Amino acid sequence: QSVGDPTEAARLALAARRLAAPYDDQRDLECSALRVLGDSLWPDVAAARRAWQEGADLATAHGMRLWRGRLLICLARADLLDGSGEDVIAEVEEIAREAGAPLLAAQAAALQAELALLRWRPDEVREHLRAVEALLSEVTLPAAVAADVATVSDVAEVLAGKHAAETPIGRTVLDLLDGVVPEPRPTGMSVTGLLVRSVVDPGFAMSWSGRAEGADTDPPSSPGNAPDVLSLGRTLSALPWLGALRVMWTVPLLPAAERRGEQVDLLRRAAEVFDALPAGAGAARRCRDHLRERGASFPRRPSAQHGVPTSLSRQGITIREWDVLRLLEEGLTSRQIADRLFLSPRTVEKHVERMLAKTGAPNRAALAAISAAAVT
């Protein structure tokens, strides 16, 4: 597999599995073969998932916890395509702690960073990347994992508006945000790379043809295929910035009068996502241009205090802090607020700290009372 021939890797993996299967003391070799087989089938998600799941089940049946963790890492990578995978990664982290396996822990942290990137929670991205770096004193990452870590770091820099496009995928994201059709560039194994490439590569989404066999969601839309507005909406909800990119690039391919209401809703939602993204100003303008072409009203980029009750805006409360404040009033925890607003819990806590300082409120309960008073 290291020489880049997935067909040969699959052939050898199947051969190794056949040789190992008759022997009870070779189950670790069989698990290894199934992991390589799944890797060689990627990105045919359904086929790869079947191989990895079979390996994980085999490891569980024979009490091989470490091998279960290695196969779960692969399955979690597939889950990231839908913006999920936390539960699987959490189990991997538990196995890594039990087994004293720093490499497995580093791989789990790398996937956590990628999941945070896909959801655009920059504080969590940095936190998980620091965890990976801390483990590098104990282990050396496989080349593919190291490449994925570099992808996460570089794309995070681009989305944060720093335009540090040092890797091919970073340059591709920057091109997409700028409305430029990117050159075909290799993306390796990273889920972010696969999803970004599917935005503009006409034939790439078709290589995911097996996905419909193993999941409820459809293959990603691309300019080479008729955009599916339902699929676009699902992606926009699960993976906001990627979904917004896909909307910006694919909705204009539809006739303006076809399902106009759904097109308008998607473009408005995409513009809102880009408005909240440091690097998204140009992309938000393009979404508004598409709305104008459809004769629809469009949201202008809000000021920092647009929509905040007057009594609170006078105290310097921003619109994002107001969002947090309203959820505090509902009694939600920082984690629940973070999930609702696509932030990290640490960012929510910082918003709370700033509001306490601005309002002079002694605690969160007092803040919630201020929120209730502001709308009465």
Image: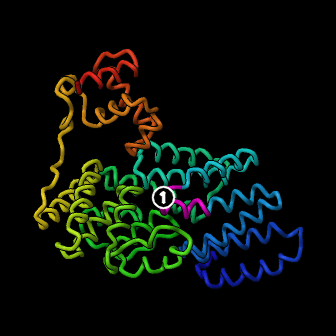
Give the quadrant of residue 338: top left
Magenta stretch: residue 76 in it? yes
Magenta stretch: residue 232 in it? no
Q: Pick whichever, 298 or 24, lies toward us.
A: 298
- How many numbered marks have been drawn onto this rendered protein structure? 1
- Relative to 163, is 167 on the left or the right? right
- Relative to 229, is 348 on the left or the right? right
Give the quadrant of residue 78: bottom right
Q: In which quarter of the image is the N terminus?
A: bottom right
Q: Where is residue 266 in the image (x, y as percent from the top left)?
A: 27, 61
Q: What residue type is labelled 1?
A: Ala
Q: Position of residue 196 (x, y in %)?
A: 39, 67
Q: Mark 1 points at which residue?
A: 150
User: Residue at image x 66%, y 50%?
Assistant: 91
User: Residue at image x 23%, y 24%?
Assistant: 376
User: Residue at image x 66%, y 68%?
Assistant: 52
Query: Circle 1 — which element?
Result: helix
* Mark 1 crowd level (few <14, some 14–19, many ≥20, 10 Å Cα): some
Q: Position of residue 213 (x, y in %)?
A: 55, 75
Stretch of the chain drawn in magenta? 75-84
Q: Where is residue 367 in the image (x, y as percent from the top left)?
A: 34, 22
User: Residue at image x 66%, y 52%?
Assistant: 92
Characterize the magenta stretch by its predominant secondary structure: helix
